[in-house]
Amino acid sequence: MQKINNLKSAIHSELKGNVALMALINGVYNLNVKDGIEMPYVTYFIVTQRGDDNFSNTIDYPWIQVDCYAQKTVTKSAQQLAGEVAEAVANVLDDVTLTITGYTCVCFHREATREVWDPILKAWDIIIDYRGMIEQPK
């Protein structure tokens, strides 16, 4: 569990440390957003569905999902604002080399991007999937 927490911490620090991204959003959250936080915001989580990204190997390939949520404002559509947030996230995470305690991070790169309207939140969500390659030092 500590290895996963170290990866979460590295992702969080990288996103929160970017001034351009933080100027667009009201926060960065691991999976769950605190009550009362207004959009736009970014959530992320580690998706573990394959045997080679379960943090038990010498080399792991974690899959990270980042969601960029936005609702319409007076001056911008939800889709436009979510697009700006997604572009800022991509500027931070595309091909990034993270500092992860206990690992040597080779890189993270984008595998897919998709857009979804969330009728419950009445928000546009642009989802970006990243695949990493991280190695435990020998």
Image (cartoon, helix red, strand yellow):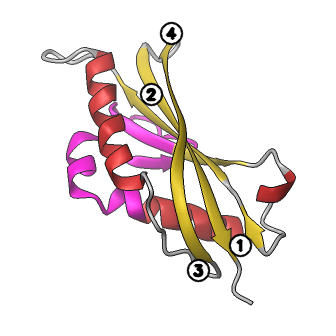
Cα separation, mark 1 vs mark 4, equals 35 Å
Helix, strand, or loop for circle 3? loop
Q: Amino acid at mark 4?
A: Pro
Residue at 58%, 43% (x, y): give it: 31
Q: How far across and how far down the image is residue 40, in percent? A: 33, 32
Give me the C-alpha separation between circle 2 and circle 1.
Answer: 29 Å
Question: Which residue does the numbered mark 1 point to in the structure image?
Answer: 2
Can residue 37 be seen here?
A: no
- Look at mark 2 in the image and give the residue it sits on: 126
Q: Mark 4 or mark 3, which is nearer the start of the sequence?
A: 3
Quarter of the figure with the C terminus: bottom right
Q: Quadrant of the N terminus?
A: bottom right
Q: Is residue 84 magenta?
A: no
Tell me the distance, in whole angstroms, between the alpha carbons under discs 4 and 2: 14 Å
- Is label 1 in contact with label 4 (beta carbons under 8 Å)? no
Q: Which label belongs to residue 119?
A: 4
Label 4, residues with CA under 10 Å away: few <14, some 14-19, many ≥20: few
Q: Quick one: SS at disc 1? A: helix
Residue 32: x %, y % from top left: 56, 41
Amino acid bearing label 2: Ile
**Residues at circles 3 and 4 in contact by the CB criterion of under 8 Å:** no
